[in-house]
Amino acid sequence: MCIRDRYQRRVHGTKMSDNPVIHIGGLSPSIDENIVYAAFVPFGEVKTVDLPHDPLTTAPKGYAFVEYEDASDCLHAIANMDGAELLGKVIHVSHAKNPKFRDETNRPIWAEEKFILSKAEAEEKEPEAH
């Protein structure tokens, strides 16, 4: 499968190329939103820049999300910036995963109602050992 096909495949009900958000990893601790914006605005109109910070140290966590107005701009940003150097660090740029999907997959199995019900049924069937 070629790289273009990977970008066009369907993921979680939408094409990756329809997702207007990219993930940028490997960022320098001295990065800020303005630098990320300036680095990625040449590829299209940037809607938002999200640069998460560590709540204890207030330093950036080393990754960011950039949302474009047009999803096709993501392909240009990925093609041009993945493996590029920004503030002395090589960055990795890819499509961001659908947050809805991430939330569902990161739930522990015991948080699922089906799991709880099956455990309750199994305990009811076990004879009590005294």
Image (cartoon, rainbow, N blue to C red):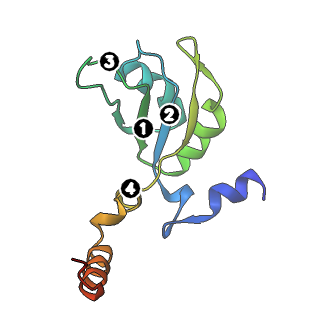
Extreme residue toward the right, this view: 1
Find the residue positioned furthest to the front.
130
**Which residue position is annotated with label 4?**
106
Give the mark toward the camera: 3 or 1.
Answer: 3
Frontmost of labels 4 and 2 is 4
Q: Position of residue 19 (x, y in %)?
A: 47, 55
Amino acid at circle 4: Asn
- Earlier in the chain: of badge 3 and badge 4, it is 3
Drawn side of residue 41 relative to residue 7, left or right: left
The residues bearing labels 1 and 4 have C-alpha atoms spaced at a distance of 22 Å
Q: Which residue is mark 3?
A: 59
First-in-chain label (3 vs 1): 3
Q: Position of residue 14 (x, y in %)?
A: 50, 66
Does residue 122 sit above or below 98 in this rendering? below
Closest to the observer: 46 or 105?
105
Residue at 38%, 55% in the rendered image: 106
Q: Give the number of the mark in front: 3 or 2.
A: 3
Q: CA distance from mark 1 to mark 2?
A: 8 Å
Circles 4 and 2, Cβ within 8 Å, touching? The answer is no
Contact flag, marks 3 and 1 (Cβ < 8 Å): no
* Residue 9: quadrant of the picture: bottom right
Is residue 5 positioned above or below 31 on the image? Answer: below
Q: Are marks 1 and 2 in contact (CB under 8 Å)?
A: yes
Which of the labelled discs sits on residue 66, or is there none? 1
Q: Amino acid at mark 2?
A: Ile
Amino acid residing under circle 1: Val
Question: Which numbered dot is residue 11?
Answer: none
Q: Which residue is mark 2?
A: 24
* Mark 4 to mark 2 CA distance (whole Å): 21 Å
**Contact (Cβ within 8 Å) of mark 1 with mark 4:** no
Q: Sequence order check: which comes first, mark 1 or mark 2?
A: 2
